[in-house]
Image (cartoon, rainbow, N blue to C red):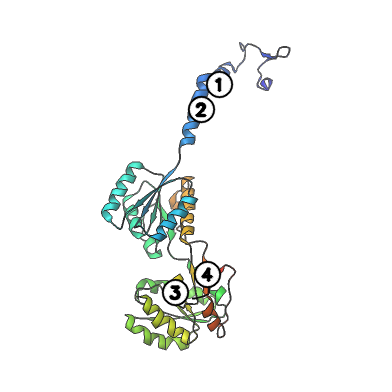
Amino acid sequence: MLSEYNIPVNKKTTAIVPLVSCPFRKAFTLFSSPRFFLLAFLLVAANSSYAAEVDVIKSKDTPPYTLMVKGFSESVKAGVAENDMGSSQEKGMLILKKIKSRKPDAIFTLGAEATYLAGNNIREIPVVFSMVSNSESHQMEGNNITGINLEISQEEQIGKLMEVMPGVRKIGTLYGEEKTKLFLDQIRPLLGRHGIKLIEERISSTKDIPSAMERMLPEIDAFWLAFDSVVASSPRVVQEIIIFPALKNNIPVIGFNKWSVTAGALFCLYTEYEDIGRQAGKIVNRILNGVPPSSIPVESPENVKVLLNEKVMQRVGTKLKLEVPNNAYIWEGN
């Protein structure tokens, strides 16, 4: 092998001939030096000992956030330091001061409070947010910010709806908040592409719901329960004033969370908190690999699942064609 580098070899003794005239003498001498190998070892050791670090900031300590941090820690290729604001702005500022001195490679925020705090005070460290609504995420500014919206994408919602209810043609809904009106304006054309008409009515308070439902139910095939503070003001209102009257008319209700399905809604879409954490970990991994946050669009939750109420499906399935998607989970009821 040495002869391949023009280093003469005495074939009788297989000993290396003195390198007086060898043009690589200086280089060979350097590379064979013990000091060179020591330096190389130290450089490799230093490089291998470096591990990326990510700080997690939770708006408060809740079971969903705990699950998200668990999924995030499993996915991200970095050390994770967890911080809890406890819904305290003062405590949050102390956390930021500590983070600025540590200078981690990225920050992962959970909830609007932590996201606003980091987004408004951090510019030199990438921030990946989660558990922030679509409307709230649009208020985030800065080239160092990206993340995951709280809401499932509109296209995904309509697609799953058509899988469960391929025969639906008229969907009704009530709303009280302006952000819900904006959402309805956005999904109306998407529904229209599938031949579905959206019938909506605005209400000012819970007292308006019974009369609005009475007018709407004879005109629709299904009712979309909006995540709206005026409409879904309490569990009792949702179940007794919206879901029960709809079921009496064999009108299925599209719920907004697992509880609504247990309360009588036909189905809902949901994502596991750990899955959102894993998705955030993948985004941070891209940033750690050199992709700028400004080049990563804000994402919607992935791995969307369907939860179906079996008893309600049996009840309303005689009036409206219903299907069970391949990835659906069935709630059999109590």
Residue 265: tell me if it is visible. yes
Which residue is painted at 50% across and 23% down in the image? Answer: 38
Which residue is painted at 55% across and 75% down in the image? Answer: 164
Residue 306 circle label: 4
Above or below for 47 versus 26: below
Relative depth, front residue between 53 and 310: 310
Circle 3: element type: helix
Q: In the orientation shown, which residue stands out farthest toward the left?
A: 90
Q: CA distance from mark 3 to mark 2?
A: 61 Å
Discs 1, 3 touching: Cβ within 8 Å: no
Residue 295: tell me if it is visible. no
Residue 260 circle label: 3
Give the mark nearest the N terminus, 4 or 3. 3
Judging by the rendered image, the residue that carries numbered circle 1 is 31
Q: Amino acid at mark 1?
A: Phe
- Residue 116, image x and y in percent? 33, 57
Q: Amino acid at mark 4?
A: Val
- Residue 148, image x and y in percent? 44, 59
Please tell me whether mark 3 or mark 2 is closer to you in this view: 3
Residue 41 circle label: 2
Left-right relation of 101 to 247: left
Relative depth, front residue between 225 and 72: 72
Give the mark nearest the N terminus, 1 or 2. 1
Q: Amino acid at mark 2?
A: Phe
Circle 2: element type: helix
